[in-house]
Image (cartoon, rainbow, N blue to C red):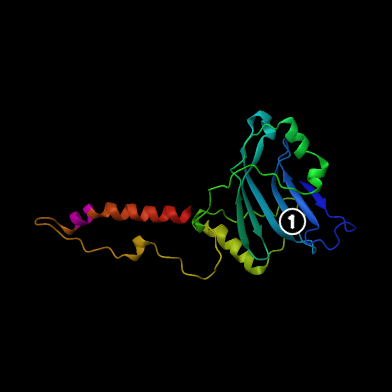
Amino acid sequence: MVEARAREDWLPNYYAPRLVYWLEKHSFYPLRIEQYGRDGKLALVEVRLTNMFNPALGERGYGPLFVVYWDIASDALTYMVRDNHRVRHWTPDEVELFFNPDFMRRQWYLDTSVKTQAEVVNPEQFFLRPALDENKFPSERQIQLPAEVAEHVAAQEAAGRLIFELGKTAPVTTAEAKPSPTPVTKPGESVADANEETSDSYVQHSEHSSSTALR
């Protein structure tokens, strides 16, 4: 864990005066970043899923693929997909133009990539809220969730899925909503035999609904 603090003489009253980085110990890649507000409490969590984008660099060739942000006060979850990395070899002229203090001082943004086409279209596809890991470095991390957010987190951990509204009746799946039809028997066929013929289609439907809800 590495800590960064804003200098009051440089950034007075800065909204996030303290950052805590959780680094991979070999490559020092930031896997998790925590922002703490002026009251000292945890305000935002950023977690990253990484991918090897430049194998030639070995353990330093990893980059962020999927980044999840959790704003605790508003209990808002957002994400960013960064699947458009590519290795590029710069010419001597490009190195001279782009990689110099004046270019960086002007805060020009150099982006030669293309916009990603990946997106999350359903809530069922989204990640859960990041783990708080309150037992890790407790003396260095002041975690105090709003009561409603704490309830959402507890409900999420119990259900294994995202929870934003408490006390709501769980949605009924299509298979549960439709009553089982009365089987039509053929001459010489019992009701049990007819049920056996039609049961497979309902079992498959139910399994499909469950897998969709748990993704």
Q: Residues within 10 Å of mark 1 (few under 14, many from 20)?
A: many
Going by the picture, which residue comes out furthest to the right?
9
Residue 140 shown in magenta? no
- List the single residue furthest toward the front: 93
Q: Position of residue 69 (x, y in %)?
A: 65, 55
Residue closest to the far left: 187
Q: In the rendering, at what x and y percent does residue 188 appear?
A: 9, 55
* Residue depicted at x 59% and y 64%: 152
- Relative depth, front residue between 68 and 139: 68
> Residue drawn at (71%, 47%), measured in percent from left and top?
109
Q: Quadrant of residue 151?
A: bottom right
Kind of residue sitting beneath label 1: Gln
How many numbered discs sit on the rendered protein? 1
In the rendered structure, the answer to whether residue 194 lies left or right of residue 58 reads left
Q: Is residue 195 magenta?
A: yes
Per the image, label 1 sits on a secondary structure element best described as strand
Q: Residue at x 64, y 42 (%)?
A: 112
Relative depth, front residue between 81 and 18: 81
> Residue at position x 72%, y 63% from top?
144
How would you classify the magenta stretch by its main secondary structure? helix
Q: Which residues are magenta?
A: 192-197
Q: Is residue 138 left or right of residue 153?
A: right
Depth check: give the residue in front, 20 or 117.
Answer: 117
Q: Is residue 170 above or below residue 3?
A: below
Q: Which residue is mark 1?
A: 35
- Out of 117 and 77, give the one closest to the viewer: 117
- Residue lying at the far bottom of the rendered structure: 167
> Where residue 138 appears, x then y in whole percent?
75, 54
Q: Is residue 98 left or right of residue 157?
A: right
